């Protein structure tokens, strides 16, 4: 599908006189990796996508060295992690449908990127609930600011550990308000922010952000109760 879409986009760009840098590919789960395939195919023909946004890129069988979405696939790649595991190699019996490995120039780990508040679905959450919330967060971000706190640790793993400690202690504060950055549609690349490595793959780096989502507050948004990030006034 990635190869087919790359061909379709090439024809579309010729017909409407647009460039690959004007194209923004948004993909959820396996679709995030498909955006990566589109990007790599276009790069091989001398074109580079302007942006790829990965919504909780698929984890089972798509971690490690597998040909998955990376920041090399477009000029700007941003990723929202909501249901990731470190090495979710198979689907059966696995809670994690996404992965925690950095895939973009900026990676946003919502509530540590593994699981989201369950009370929004009245206790009826299925296996893909947290996985699918990445789409809802992104859609909400189009018209609203959702902010992440910059990880200032030496690895992403340390960042997630610190974030979990704060959640366990009921602390939704951040160290420096100036390090906040918008996630989703409004995400941008700040070259002044240093990339940090993932502890299990030193060659993989990202500008990582921890996003705190309130587990007590929400607003009705369509058929969903939209969780909101909870920051100090």
Image (spheres, grey):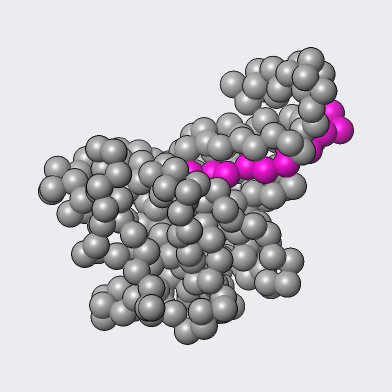
Is there any visible trace of residue 90 in the rendered image?
yes
Residue 191 % position (x, y): 74, 66
Residue 25 % position (x, y): 61, 35
Name the residue rendered at 37%, 64% in the picture. Answer: 229
Q: Is residue 196 left or right of residue 89?
A: right
- In the image, residue 166 sits, relative to residue 219, either above or below, namely below
Residue 215, picture quadrant: bottom left
Foreground residue among 65 and 176: 176
Numbered disc total: 0
Residue 49, picture quadrant: top right
Check residue 207 for magenta coloring: no
- In the image, residue 61 sits, relative to residue 100, either above or below, namely above
- In the image, residue 192 sits, relative to residue 146, either above or below, namely below
Is there any visible trace of residue 97 in the rendered image?
no
Check residue 50 for magenta coloring: yes
**Start-end of magenta stretch:** 43-55
Residue with the most extreme right position: 46
Residue 79 % position (x, y): 54, 51
Name the residue rendered at 38%, 44% in the picture. Answer: 136
Residue with the most extreme left position: 123
Name the residue rendered at 37%, 51% in the picture. Answer: 83
Q: Is residue 154 left or right of residue 80?
A: right
Name the residue rendered at 47%, 84% in the picture. Answer: 175
Question: Which quadrant is home to the C terminus?
Answer: bottom left
Q: Is residue 131 left or right of residue 40?
A: left
Residue 53 % position (x, y): 57, 44
Foreground residue among 191 and 223: 223
């Amino acid at each position: 599908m990635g190869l087919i879409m790359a061909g379709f986009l090439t024809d579309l760009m010729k017909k409407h006189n647009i460039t690959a840098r004007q194209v923004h590919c948004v993909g959820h789960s396996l679709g995030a990796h498909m955006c990566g395939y589109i990007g790599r195919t276009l790069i091989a023909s001398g074109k580079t996508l302007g942006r790829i946004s990965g919504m909780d890129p698929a984890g089972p069988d798509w971690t490690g060295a597998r040909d998955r979405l990376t920041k090399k696939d477009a000029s700007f790649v941003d990723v929202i992690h909501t249901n990731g595991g470190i090495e979710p190699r198979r689907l059966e019996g696995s809670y994690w449908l996404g992965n925690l490995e950095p895939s973009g120039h900026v990676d946003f780990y919502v509530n540590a990127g593994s699981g989201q508040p369950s009370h929004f679905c009245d206790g009826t959450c299925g296996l893909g609930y947290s996985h699918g919330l990445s789409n809802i967060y992104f859609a909400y971000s189009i018209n609203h600011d959702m902010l992440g706190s910059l990880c200032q640790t030496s690895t992403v793993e340390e960042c997630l550990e610190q974030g979990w400690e704060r959640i366990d202690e009921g602390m939704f504060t951040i160290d420096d308000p100036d390090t906040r950055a918008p996630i989703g549609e409004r995400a941008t690349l700040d070259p002044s922010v240093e990339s940090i490595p993932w502890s299990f793959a030193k060659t993989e780096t990202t500008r990582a952000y921890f996003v705190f989502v309130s587990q007590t507050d929400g607003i009705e948004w369509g058929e969903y109760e939209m969780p909101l990030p909870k920051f100090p006034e």
